[in-house]
Amino acid sequence: MTENTISQHGQWSSRFAFILAATGSAVGLGNIWKFPYIVGENGGGAFVLIYLFCVIGVGIPIMMAEIMLGRRGRHSPINTMERLTAEAKADPNWHYLGWMGVIAGFLILAYYSVIAGWSLAYIIKAFFGDFINQDAIQIAQLYEQFIASPIQQIFWHTIFMAFTMNIVGRGVNAGLEQSARFLIPALFSLMFLLVAYAMTTGSYFQGLHFLFSVDFSKLSSDAFLIALGQAFFSLGLGMGSIMIYGAYLPKNISIARTSVIIAGADTLVALLAGIVIFPIVFENGLAPSEGPGLIFKILPIAFGQMTGGWLIGVFFFILLFFAALTSAVALIEPAVAWLIEHQQISRKTACIWAGLAAWLLGIGVALSFNIWSTFKLFDKNLFGLLDYLTSNLMLPIGGFCIAIFAGWIMNSEHSRSELALAKPEFYLLWKQLVCYIAPVAVFCVFLHVVGVI
Ligand code: TRP
């Protein structure tokens, strides 16, 4: 079906461009903000080991499946699923999978943009020396005051959204690819710089020990499920981000090899974030199990007290901003591509509509931290609700369906030729993983989320 066709939206100019852009999608707040705090909450090394198993055993096979579906369909996730469903003569309801992805990306972006806006605000705070010589209580106050201000929340969210839509509006090559070409190498450089700093702290080895020494007695019963959920979010699977990136992938590029590289880079950044953060946490006598506030409430204390902390603080929040930006563009690209295909409008117009809608919903999220914090549904404010709905329900359901579609519904000849693996055994292994292991694992996560196990 797709021989010699190119997506109407364009295609990556090289294998390297695809790897950078897809790494940009994967590496984000999930790696730098979330990974360290959940490792902290789950006792360290043993959890990291389980996380690695989840990435290799479930994450990579599903990533291959999702990229493969995208490349074969060559359209936005909605139209891709429609085409693949027709090709496989499957139940037409499968195309709702594409819809769920586009909607999930849009919902994630609405809150992602608010949190990413915090990184922008914290660059400015760090730059103006707001953390210098502040104690834990003052830093916590700074954070509380910041999130309590509707104007500031909306302002930074708006700025972040403007950055995002400006990149998406430029298109596949001049926008997504070009920004990743600059931002990803910058992100890795900043990361290594921060690791070098972490090495100079007296607690560097204590940090490493926490991250890498495996002690299974510290594991909680649901560590596996938490690790798998995190692998999904961090690799950016289950909603069509990587599917649309696959739609722009030239035919001759190996899906397996690039998936391994992308997952490897994503995992490396998560581990490096841990290597940077835990020594700083221990150095300052703080607790690794602080929870979601870890980087905004804890790190500034350290930045304000350490020598050179001013600059390290500025760098750290710039790093967080870069990481969030290249993920945000991946979250909205499926919706933008669909609008272009369906409404036959220009990319710029599609960006304005999709961006405006996500921005409006994001305003609700920004206000859910302050004046709307008392509006709750199922005991969650709007931020909590969107996070729960997407990360815990839509992504696992999406990942499960992608594995089932690629493994059971799609014609094996098609998946075999699309993946073009070097050895027949590799194809068989992949097939086992997407047909059995991945769906069962994801199903367990899902049952856990809804409270059955
Ligand atoms: N992976 C990104 C992060 O770690 C976020 C992200 C981008 C994402 N695309 C996604 C999450 C698709 C889930 C699904 O922050």
Image: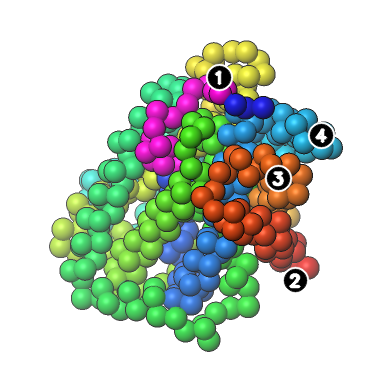
| Camera-nearest residue between 162 and 419 | 419
If you read the primary sequence from the N terminus, does the residue marked by circle 4 or circle 3 appear first? 4
Marks 2 and 1, Cα distance to the nearest angstrom? 45 Å
As drawn, the residue found furthest toward the top would be: 345
Q: Is residue 246 visible?
A: yes
Q: Cβ–Cβ below 8 Å for labels 1 and 3?
A: no
CA distance for labels 4 and 2: 35 Å
Q: Residue at x 71, y 56 (%)?
A: 435
Q: Position of residue 293 (x, y in %)?
A: 45, 60
Q: Secondary structure at mark 3?
A: helix
- Residue displayed at 54% across by 53% down: 423
Which of the image's four quarters has the C terminus?
bottom right
- Mark 4 or 2, which is nearer the eye? 4
Picture residue at 31% right of the left edge, 59% below the top: 300
Q: Where does label 1 land, which residue?
A: 8
Task: Give the quarter of the image for residue 443.
Answer: bottom right
Give the quadrant of the N terminus.
top right
- Calculate the distance from the C-alpha at mark 1 to the C-alpha at mark 3: 27 Å
Which comes before the other along the chain, label 4 or label 2?
4
For numbered disc 2, what is the local secondary structure?
loop
Which image quadrant is residue 77 in? top right
User: Could you give the CA–CA distance between mark 4 and mark 3, rounded to whole angstroms?
Assistant: 14 Å
Report the disc number at residue 412: 3
Q: Answer left or right for 112 relative to 389.
A: left
